Structure formats: structure tokens, C-alpha cells
């Protein structure tokens, strides 16, 4: 009974709307191209979605607290570049073995500094994390500028993104499923989860209830940094190399996915299933745009419009539309 | 106003209420919290719109979509929560609603004159118009608030608990001003919980209960008891459970020596035995809150020694104070911001402080949680639509019960209460008094701060009266009377007569 | 120490305190920003190999004015208690548009300028309208709308290029009697946009909203109009910045890195300029000096012979330090409960 109720409560209105949107988009796509409903295509989409899903997992925790992490782009880059460059830093043998943990650890360190600033110095998260993003960028530019770094992914990183540990299930998807399951369990069943939601609602009350709120905030920022870095590691494996701007296209989709899933931007409310739905929705939207190629129609009209225009405009508008649908605050009274 | 009805969700706030205020009278509104007074005022001042009913001003039907329209029609309201803008200057605040303009821009010189005049009218000449409101004390801010309302030259002036933050001297000034405004023909609507203020000020009183009008009568025609009966709707019986004779020989559960902090607490000594209810009294703001917070570990740099069951401890944080070793609980004064997470469920709120106790390795045991919550709901008779609804949907009294329940679930041995009955109905108050007696009889040591003298007298075995950050007197047994409490609160020797008390009250205030 | 000296000392102390009392928090913020800028610029002038020619001052002014305009644009949303992540995108959009329409004879150039300013105003108004009528968080709305505006810039200018009326461009970027025209432009913006705004009812309403929105509502402050105007003017100021950029580069470019860089730096400039990120306190004038501080960081790196690729690192550190300065109050707090508001 209890378990059923817990499962049932994972699907709030926003989550259902997001899942409904996914189905509608797929059906519309299928009218033009029946292959959209094939299991191959769907699995491929989930495979791609996993990258976004991992980074969104960490940021969601931070948003639930009522803060935000704008250092995602360069934390992703740090994850990827430190993992591929580990051989140059830790030595050729150790660097290959520890490449992945090292990359993730560097991301966690950035998260820890964010946590330090937000939780202990009480700096506004949006500014502090934006500053950290610039610092991470500076460090990475220095890293590539100072000496020629190793930017090739290790064979294990490659295997992690393209292989199948469980037959039929791409590894990144497996990683996302495991990470997502753990996060869902953490949010719903553990004291930490309760405390995260509570801080997002009323931190003062949480502090007076005898909870070390700073520790909770710290943990969430560290997880956020680690998740972003893990995304970077996966992306580096996927592309077989790491590069500076690899995280740039991820900030907007990550935040968008979380918000489309119904998580309150001010914190305290949101379900992980919603974030899953948001991630899949964003991924499919992206895929649709690249398949439909609206720029071709404009080219026929003699207008040369880059594909990225549509991606940016559609993302922006979809976020605003979804927010208007269920992200509104109460009117003043 | 006639036939005003307003519902919030399923909750009826006002039902078919008629109300009249005449020029040149001071009309007092009485009623318990949640009786509908505040909603009525909000409707009248355009903050909320009624579901049905009409408002007439000087015989003309009017409708207000927002506070600005009500303002323009000549209705000025001074709310319980201050409506001042802390980062703006006093003059800016006074001129914010209708600023004097020149060439389309704000005329600062004219605005300053306006502010000076308005301040002079309320007797706040000492306030400089170009200071930032943030730098003023609460009492000064309240004076600015009143000046701000007057600067709009209203026809109707509404004061909703506007004097609660004022010092006695300022209250006098405001009363003189209100009497003068009445002579000038203004209609004044006055809400206060202080009966003596109403007796001194009002011409007409109206009592509300459960969103309905009970009666309108001329001031001075009913006794205080009769009015209280009207407000609570039943006989005003003794609300306090009888005190039991206790033999308190056990060693103190909480022993505090020389507790000091900043300039606000100075050498506090304190002993509370298991089973004892110790009250904290005195005027508001004499360090009582700081003492409770300090014991609960939120004050940095507090000095002095604290012993729990004879063992010296260091109270460094609420987390530490809550630990098994100390076993302390603090029921905070502001339940909306300090006690509860309003949008979260009753379940999550109730089990929040004791969550570690019903968890293993950080995983919540849902069955144990459910059992503990059921027990607490039975004990406290919390009325809700189910434990999975948001706690914000409960009534104020039930919310306060959830705060108390949340802390009782940690099985505390020392319970600190910071004015727990403020703003809740008489029925719930009574239940809380009984609960305190019961907890004490089970061996809890209770430290109870209240701004209500009756409560201190009715509930406590001993009352420590604070003044200027120290405990100036301990009252117990027969000594525990209202006169003694008041004289001690003003730091007078025992047995002072009434006139001396009043004189002293003014002195302290200034 | 003898008694008379002590008296004299304490007298001076109270005098100074009284002087400080008269300065508002915002004015103090401006003074601090000016002081930091003065110190940094002197260090720059001293380390600078040659003498400080009018040309060098002019170049510095042009670069500083660009960021100053965007920082002023950022100040308005921050004052009402929001943050605008789209100022950089509007700046880039104005740049791309100007490189297309601010061309030809004086008449078409004038219409082109008007079109650019109007588009900036429109973008800001759209932001404001969505935030007010949609009752949404400024941060997320401007993040999303920033993507839309950037997308449009890409459509206007898929490849960097375009051109601009050269006479206008030269006039905007030159100097007369060693006074850079870009500095005069800033002065004009302050005189004809900022000061009237600051003294208007809606301008003060912006401060009121940032200070305490609920109380402002209760006081009958026109909240919706004031918020929309703040964002609209922000768009306008960013567009003026975009126009100046076009005059400096003679072309337009839709680069995400430019948009992000200016958004980031504008926030840093606002913080250094003494504007509270919680709203209600601050001034666009402080932001101007904050912008000059941010720009001088880059120049200092060059004269002190530090690898210029490290610039983002230093900008980030300046931002972190500025934000942490605001957090110094944490150390003074004696009641932990005051941390949680």
C-alpha cells in the first residue's frame, strides 16, 4: 500500500503534461516519418537523453533548495578535459586508470566551492556560480593554452559511452537509470531528501528544527558539480575527445528540462519523474528540429538562416510557454 | 458595507456581513483571530475583492479592484504587517502613494514639507524625513506608518493592530491624535486586542465571530466579561487547568549560570526542575526571546555555564540542543517562518524534527513514521483533512499544534516555548495549557515565555520577570499576581500603587 | 595622551560619522567603485610603457563605455529585485541589426538608429511583460528569452560582417579636445535617461518594489508598470550599447561568447558599483564605474604581462570577491537565526 502510494505521488500534474507532450510530439513526427515510433529510434533518443539526464539530476537538487547552479557549462568541460587530461597530470599509468574518478572529482571540487560560497558565506547562488563558471573557464583555457594537453578519451571512457553492459541497453542510459533511481530513492525515502525539500520551502524553520542546513546545501552543490563533470566525462567518451566549449550547449537545456518537469524555480517542489520527462521532451524536441530542418523551408524563400537559430528560439519559447502553463507564482494580495 | 461574503477556498471568512462606520466616530472591531475582522478590513481597503456584497461610501456605491483605488476614494489603512519600504527614506515612504510632482517628476522639496507636516501631526517631530526607514526602531516605524496614512487626507482611517509595536508614550500621542481626528469628522475604524485601549478610545464596538457579526453596541455599555463571552461564543469559564501541588525535589534538569550575550542578556541564572513550569515575564523585548534562542544554541558568543542534569554542556547549535544528550525543544514564536514549512504536508512537518529517530542509515521508516504521527495527532487532537495535505491549509490553532507536535515527537526533556499562544483561538489555547500541565507531570522541564500576564499566572509554578536583559524578580505562589507582575516588569519595588505604575510606564517608554 | 587631544580626536570622529550618515548606502557604493577604479587606473597609467596619450584614453573609454551601457541596463532589473540574463543577447542583437540597417544617407541612418533602439526597447518590454503578466521568475524568463534574441541575431547575421555608416561610427568613437565622445554619450544617457528615470514616480516605484514588494503593493505603488518599464529601459540601454559596439567594430557578429561575456561582466559591474542584488538599493552611476573597473582588469593583465587568456579567470575572481564582500556581514552576525531570511 505504502509503496503504491509513494509511486502514485511521483506523477503530479506537470509530470503528466510533460509526458503527454512527448507522446504528442512523437505522434506528430510519426505522421511525417513512421520511423519515429520505432524502438531503435526511441532507444537512440534515450541514449542521447542520458547525457542531459545526468547533468539535470544534480542541478535539480540545487533548484529544489531554492538556489541555482549556473556553473554547469564549464563544470562539464572541466569533467571532460580533466578526465582526458588525467594522463598528463597524474602520469600515464595512473592517469588512465583514474581518468574518470579524477574528472568527476574536479567537478565535485567546483561544486564544493559553490557550496562553500552559497551555504557558508551566504552569497547569492546565481552570482556565485556564474563567477565560478568564469573561473573554471579561465582555468581550462589556461590548461589548454599552457601546454598541449592530452584530449583523447581513454578506451574505458569510450566503452562507457558506446558499449552495452546490459545487452540492448546503452551504457549511458544504464548510468542514468541507476543514478536516477538512487536520486528518486534519496528524495523520497531518506532524511536528506526531506531536508532538501524543507530547505526549499523555509530554511529558517529547518535550521530551528535542529538540522545543519549548510551541510545539506553543500552536499547538493557537490552532487551538482559531480553530475555535471560526469556528463563531461560521458560527452568526452562519446566524441572521443574533449574540447573547451563542450559544455556550452548544456546550460539552457538542463535548466529547461528541470522546469518543464514542473520543479518550482523557487525551490521546495518538484518530482524527479518530472525531470525525467523534461529531459526526454527536450531531447526529442532537439531531434525533431534536426530532422525537420526548418531552415530548408526558409532557404527556399531565399533566406539563409542557420539551424542554431531555430534551436535557440524554439527552446526559449518552449520554456516560457511551459512556465506560463504551470510555473506561475501567486498574485500579490 | 452590506451583505459582504468572502470565501478562501472552502473556508468561509465572511458571511453576509453588514457594517457601518460614521463620520466623527471611532468604531472598534472585536473578535478572535479568524473571526473575520481582518478580511473585512481587506475588503474595505481593496486588498481583496468580496465574492458578493456592496460597499457604499457617502451613499455612493463603490468597487475597489486594488488598494490604489481604495486609497483614491479616501480610505487609508494601517496594517498589522508594516507597509513601509525599508530602503527608502521616511519622506519617500510618506509620499509614495501620491507624490507631489513638478514637470512630471517628483518634487522632493514639496514631498519633504508634506512629510514634515504629517510627522508633526502624529507627534513624530523627532523623526528626520531623510533617514532611511531601515535605520528606525520598530516604534518609530509605526509612527511613520501612521503619518503616511494621514498624509493622504483620508475620509476613513483604519488601524489594524497599529499600536501593538508602539511604546506606551507613543500610544498616548496616537490616542490624542485620533481624538483630534474624530473631532475633525473622520471615520476611524480601530482593531486591537487590548481591551483597555478600546475602553479608552472607542465610541462604538462591533463583535465578530466565525465570519459573522454578533452585535454592535455603544462603548461602555457592556462589561469586559460580556464582550469576551460574545467573542468566544460561550461562557467564559476558567481556561486554566488547576495547578497540581508538586514536590520538586529532583535536581534541576536545566541549570544556567551567568548567561550573557552582547548587551542584550546580562548574567542570567536559572534553574528548572523536571516537572516544573517556569514562566518568563516582563515587558516585550527585555531579552526573553534572546534567552530562549541562546539556550537553543543560535547565539554566537554567548557566555556563561549551562548544565543539563548536572552535566556541563556547550549549546552551539539547534542541532546540538536537540541531541539525545540535551533533549531540548524550542517552540518558536513565528510559526509561519520558524515553525513550519507551509506548503509541505502535515506528515512531513510533524516528523521533521524527529526524522533521525525514525530512520535507519538515513532511510525513513515509513511505518514507524506513520505510527508516531498517528499517536501525536490523537494526543493533540489535530484536525486536518488527512496527513498528506499541506499544513498551510490548516487553521492557525491547528498549525500551532503541529509545531508543538513536531517537537513532542523528539521526546524532549526540556521544552522552551516562545509565546506559543499568540494569535490562536481560546479553545486551542486551553488545550495547550492542559498539554503543558500534562507534560510537566510526565517530568518535562518547561520554560514558558508569554506576553499575556493571565497566562503566566494561570500556568506557571514560578515566573521570572526580565528587565533590560536580566532577571529582576522571581514570583511564585501567592506573590504571583498581575499587580506584582506589572510592577516587576517595570522594575519597581513590590507594592507600588497604580498611579506610580502608570508614571513609571511612561518613563520607561521614553 | 592628555585630555585635550582626546577631546579633539573624538570631536573629529563624530564629525566624520555625521558626514557618513548623510550619504546614502548607494552613494557610498558609488564612491567605493570610483576609488577602486582610480587606484586601478593609476596602476595602469604607471605601468603603461609610454605616456598616457589621448588615443589610449579614448580606446579605454570606448571599451569601458560599451560595458558601462550594458551594466546600466543590468542595474534596472537588479533594482527591482531580478536579474537579467538577456542583456548580453539584446546587446548582440542590436549590434547585428545595426550592422544591417544603420547605413546609407543621413536619413536612412537616422531611421536605422531608431529601429535599433526600438527593437531594444521592444525586447525589454517583452521580458517585462512576460515576467509581470506571467508572474514568472526574471532569471529563468530572461535566460529563455535571451536564447530567443540570440537566435534572431544569428538569423540576421549568420556570418560576422555587415557595415555601418562610417561617418557616424567615427564620430561616435573619436574624441574632441581629449574628451572621448563615448564618455559624452555615457554622460548624455545619464542626464537624459537615468536621472529623469530616477526622479520619476515609476523610477522610485522600482526602488520600492526591490525594497519590499508586498509593502509597495499595499502602498498603492504601480508595480506592474514600474517593472515593465525597468525591463524596457534595460533593453533600450543594452541596444545603445549594441549601437556603440557596431560603431567600434564597423560590423556585426552573432557570437554566443560575446553575449555571455557581457552578461557576466555586467553583473560584476553592478555588484562592484554598490547595487544590492536583493534590490531596492543602488544606482546606475555606480554600475558605470563598476564597468570601468571590470574593463581595467583586462588592461592591467596586459601591462603586468599576464597571459591574456587568463582574463575570464580574473573576471570570475573579481566577481566572486565582490559577492563575498557582500557576505562579510555573515562574520558580524551574532544570532545565527539572522542568516536565514
Image: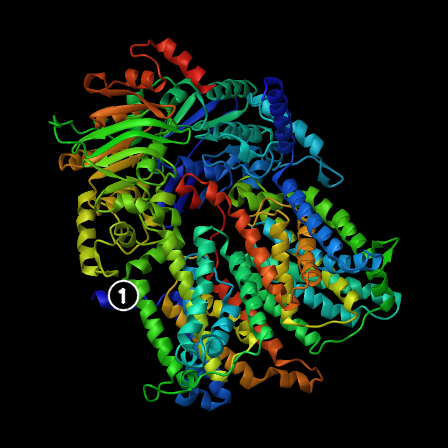
Q: Position of residue A208 (x, y in %)?
A: 33, 45
Determine the residue positioned at 39% across, 50% down: A203
- Whether residue B48 appears in this view of the structure is no
Chain letter of mark 1 equals A
Q: Describe residue A229's horizontal placement relative to residue B238 as left or right.
A: right
Q: Describe residue A272's horizontal placement relative to residue C181 as left or right.
A: left
The quarter of the image holding the N terminus of chain A is bottom left
Other-residue count near label 1 (Cα within 10 Å), few / some / many at <14 / 14–19 / ≥20: few
Instruction: Kindly state the secondary structure of the residue where label 1 is placed.
Output: helix
Q: Position of residue B13 (x, y in %)?
A: 37, 42
Near-viewer residue (B91 or A61): A61
Near-viewer residue (B90 or C11): C11
Q: Is residue B175 above or below residue C210?
A: above
Q: Describe residue B501's horizontal placement relative to residue C236 as left or right.
A: left
Q: Is residue B245 above or below residue A328?
A: above
Near-viewer residue (C272 or A283): C272
Q: Quadrant of residue B464?
A: top left
Task: Please identify the residue farthest to the front as the structure is shown.
Answer: C1
Determine the residue positioned at 54% across, 86% down: A291
State how many labels appear. 1
Q: Label 1, on which residue? A: A6
Q: Position of residue C109 (x, y in %)?
A: 84, 66
Amino acid at each position: 500500500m505504502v509503496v503504491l502510494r509513494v509511486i502514485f505521488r511521483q506523477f503530479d500534474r506537470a509530470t503528466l503534461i510533460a509526458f503527454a507532450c512527448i507522446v504528442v510530439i512523437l505522434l506528430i513526427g510519426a505522421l511525417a516519418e513512421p520511423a519515429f515510433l520505432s524502438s531503435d529510434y526511441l532507444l537512440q533518443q534515450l541514449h542521447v537523453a542520458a547525457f542531459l539526464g545526468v547533468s539535470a539530476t544534480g542541478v535539480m537538487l540545487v533548484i529544489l533548495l531554492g538556489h541555482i547552479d549556473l556553473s554547469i557549462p564549464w563544470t562539464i568541460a572541466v569533467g571532460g578535459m580533466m578526465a582526458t587530461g588525467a594522463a598528463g597530470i597524474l602520469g600515464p599509468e595512473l592517469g588512465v586508470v583514474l581518468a574518470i574518478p579524477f574528472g568527476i572529482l574536479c567537478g565535485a571540487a567546483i561544486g564544493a566551492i559553490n557550496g562553500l560560497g552559497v551555504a557558508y558565506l551566504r552569497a547569492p547562488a546565481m552570482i556565485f556560480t556564474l563567477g565560478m563558471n568564469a573561473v573554471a573557464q579561465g582555468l581550462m583555457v589556461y590548461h589548454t593554452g599552457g601546454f598541449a594537453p592530452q584530449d583523447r578519451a581513454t578506451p574505458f571512457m569510450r566503452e562507457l559511452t558506446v558499449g552495452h553492459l546490459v545487452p540492448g541497453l546503452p551504457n549511458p542510459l544504464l548510468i542514468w537509470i541507476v543514478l536516477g533511481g538512487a536520486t528518486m530513492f534519496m528524495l523520497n525515502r531518506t532524511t536528506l531528501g526531506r531536508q532538501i525539500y524543507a530547505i526549499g520551502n523555509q530554511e529558517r524553520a529547518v535550521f530551528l528544527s535542529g538540522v545543519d542546513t549548510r551541510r545539506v546545501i553543500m552536499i547538493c552543490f557537490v552532487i551538482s558539480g559531480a553530475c555535471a563533470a560526469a556528463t563531461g566525462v560521458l560527452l568526452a567518451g562519446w566524441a572521443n575527445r574533449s574540447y573547451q566549449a563542450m559544455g556550452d550547449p548544456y546550460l539552457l537545456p538542463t535548466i529547461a528540462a528541470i522546469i518543464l518537469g514542473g520543479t518550482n524555480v523557487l525551490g521546495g517542489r518538484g518530482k524527479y519523474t518530472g525531470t525525467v520527462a523534461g529531459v526526454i521532451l527536450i531531447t526529442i524536441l532537439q531531434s525533431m528540429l534536426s530532422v525537420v530542418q526548418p531552415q530548408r523551408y526558409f532557404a527556399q524563400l531565399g533566406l539563409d538562416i542557420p539551424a542554431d537559430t531555430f534551436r535557440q528560439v524554439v527552446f526559449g519559447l518552449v520554456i516560457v510557454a511551459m512556465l506560463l502553463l504551470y510555473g506561475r507564482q501567486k498574485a500579490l494580495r | 458595507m452590506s451583505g459582504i461574503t468572502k470565501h478562501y477556498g472552502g473556508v468561509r471568512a465572511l458571511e453576509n456581513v453588514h457594517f457601518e462606520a460614521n463620520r466623527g466616530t471611532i468604531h472598534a472591531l472585536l473578535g478572535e483571530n479568524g473571526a473575520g475582522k481582518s478580511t473585512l478590513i481587506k475588503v474595505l481597503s481593496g486588498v481583496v475583492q468580496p465574492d458578493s456584497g456592496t460597499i457604499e461610501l457617502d451613499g455612493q456605491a463603490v468597487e475597489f479592484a486594488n488598494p490604489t483605488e481604495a486609497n483614491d476614494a479616501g480610505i487609508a489603512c494601517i496594517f498589522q504587517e508594516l507597509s513601509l519600504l525599508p530602503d527608502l527614506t521616511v519622506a519617500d515612504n510618506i509620499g509614495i502613494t501620491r507624490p507631489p510632482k513638478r514637470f512630471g517628476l517628483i518634487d522632493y522639496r514639496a514631498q519633504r514639507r508634506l512629510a514634515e507636516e504629517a510627522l508633526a501631526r502624529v507627534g513624530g517631530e523627532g523623526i528626520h524625513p531623510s533617514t532611511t526607514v531601515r535605520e528606525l526602531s520598530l516604534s518609530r516605524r509605526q509612527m511613520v506608518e501612521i503619518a503616511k496614512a494621514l498624509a493622504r487626507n483620508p475620509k476613513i482611517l483604519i488601524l489594524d493592530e497599529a499600536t501593538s509595536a508602539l511604546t506606551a508614550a507613543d500610544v498616548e500621542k496616537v490616542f490624542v491624535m485620533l481624538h483630534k481626528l474624530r473631532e475633525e469628522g473622520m471615520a476611524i475604524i480601530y482593531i486591537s486586542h487590548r481591551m483597555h485601549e478600546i475602553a479608552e478610545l472607542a465610541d462604538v464596538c462591533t463583535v465578530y465571530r466565525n465570519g459573522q457579526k454578533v452585535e454592535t453596541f455603544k462603548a461602555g455599555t457592556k462589561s469586559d466579561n460580556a464582550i469576551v463571552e460574545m467573542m468566544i461564543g460561550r461562557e467564559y469559564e476558567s481556561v486554566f487547568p488547576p495547578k497540581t501541588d508538586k514536590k520538586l525535589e529532583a535536581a534541576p534538569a536545566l541549570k544556567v549560570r551567568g548567561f550573557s550575550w552582547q548587551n542584550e542578556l546580562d548574567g542570567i541564572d536559572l534553574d528548572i526542575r523536571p516537572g516544573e513550569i517556569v514562566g518568563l515575564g516582563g515587558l516585550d523585548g527585555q531579552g526573553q526571546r534572546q534567552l530562549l534562542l541562546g539556550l537553543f544554541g543560535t547565539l554566537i558568543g554567548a557566555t556563561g555555564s549551562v548544565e543539563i542534569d548536572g552535566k556541563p554542556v556547550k549549546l552551539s547549535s539547534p542541532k546540538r540542543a536537540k541531541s539525545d544528550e540535551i533533549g531540548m525543544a524550542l517552540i518558536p514564536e513565528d510559526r509561519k517562518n520558524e515553525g513550519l514549512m507551509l506548503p509541505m504536508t502535515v506528515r512531513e512537518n510533524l516528523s521533521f524534527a524527529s526524522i533521525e529517530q525514525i530512520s535507519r542509515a538515513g532511510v525513513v521508516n515509513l511505518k514507524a513514521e506513520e505510527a508516531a504521527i498517528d499517536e501525536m495527532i490523537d494526543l493533540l487532537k489535530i484536525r486536518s483533512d488527512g496527513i498528506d495535505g499541506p499544513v498551510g491549509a490548516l487553521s492557525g490553532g491547528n498549525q500551532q499544534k503541529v509545531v508543538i507536535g513536531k517537537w513532542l515527537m523528539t521526546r524532549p526533556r526540556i521544552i522552551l516555548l516562545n509565546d506559543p499562544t499568540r494569535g490562536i483561538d481560546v479553545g486551542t489555547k486551553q488545550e495547550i495549557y492542559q498539554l503543558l500541565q500534562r507534560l510537566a507531570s510526565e517530568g518535562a522541564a518547561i520554560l514558558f515565555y508569554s506576553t499575556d500576564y493571565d497566562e503566566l499566572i494561570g500556568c506557571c509554578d514560578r515566573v521570572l520577570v526580565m528587565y533590560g536583559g536580566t532577571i529582576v524578580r522571581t514570583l511564585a505562589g501567592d506573590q504571583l499576581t498581575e499587580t506584582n507582575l506589572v510592577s516587576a516588569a517595570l522594575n519597581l519595588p513590590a507594592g507600588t500603587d497604580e498611579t506610580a505604575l502608570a508614571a513609571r510606564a511612561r518613563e520607561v517608554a521614553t | 595622551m592628555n585630555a585635550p587631544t582626546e577631546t579633539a580626536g573624538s570631536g573629529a570622529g563624530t564629525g566624520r560619522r555625521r558626514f557618513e550618515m548623510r550619504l546614502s548606502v548607494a552613494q557610498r557604493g558609488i564612491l567605493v567603485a570610483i576609488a577602486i577604479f582610480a587606484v586601478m587606473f593609476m596602476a595602469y597609467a604607471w605601468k603603461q610603457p609610454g605616456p598616457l596619450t589621448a588615443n589610449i584614453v579614448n580606446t579605454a573609454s570606448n571599451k569601458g563605455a560599451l560595458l558601462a551601457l550594458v551594466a546600466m541596463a543590468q542595474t534596472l532589473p537588479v533594482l527591482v529585485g531580478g536579474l537579467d540574463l538577456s542583456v548580453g543577447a539584446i546587446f548582440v542583437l542590436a549590434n547585428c541589426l545595426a550592422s544591417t540597417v544603420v547605413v546609407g544617407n543621413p536619413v536612412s541612418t537616422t531611421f536605422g538608429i531608431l529601429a535599433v533602439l526600438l527593437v531594444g526597447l521592444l525586447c525589454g518590454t517583452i521580458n517585462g511583460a512576460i515576467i509581470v503578466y506571467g508572474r514568472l521568475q526574471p532569471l529563468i524568463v530572461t535566460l529563455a528569452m535571451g536564447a530567443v534574441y540570440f537566435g534572431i541575431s544569428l538569423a540576421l547575421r549568420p556570418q560576422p560582417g555587415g557595415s555601418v555608416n562610417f561617418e557616424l561610427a567615427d564620430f561616435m568613437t573619436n574624441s574632441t579636445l581629449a574628451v572621448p565622445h563615448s564618455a559624452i554619450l555615457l554622460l548624455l544617457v545619464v542626464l537624459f535617461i537615468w536621472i529623469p528615470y530616477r526622479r520619476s514616480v515609476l523610477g522610485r516605484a522600482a526602488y520600492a518594489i526591490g525594497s519590499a514588494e508586498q509593502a509597495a503593493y499595499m502602498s498603492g505603488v504601480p508595480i506592474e508598470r514600474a517593472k515593465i518599464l525597468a525591463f524596457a529601459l534595460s533593453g533600450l540601454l543594452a541596444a545603445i550599447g549594441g549601437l556603440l559596439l557596431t560603431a567600434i567594430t564597423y560590423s556585426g557578429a552573432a557570437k554566443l561568447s560575446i553575449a555571455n561575456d557581457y552578461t557576466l561582466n555586467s553583473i560584476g559591474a553592478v555588484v562592484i558599483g554598490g547595487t544590492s542584488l536583493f534590490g531596492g538599493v543602488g544606482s546606475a552611476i555606480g554600475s558605470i564605474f563598476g564597468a570601468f573597473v571590470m574593463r581595467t582588469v583586462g588592461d592591467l593583465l596586459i601591462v603586468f604581462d599576464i597571459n591574456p587568456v587568463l582574463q575570464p579567470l580574473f573576471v570570475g575572481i573579481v566577481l566572486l570577491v565582490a559577492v563575498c564582500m557582500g557576505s562579510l556581514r555573515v562574520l558580524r552576525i551574532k544570532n545565527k537565526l539572522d542568516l536565514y531570511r
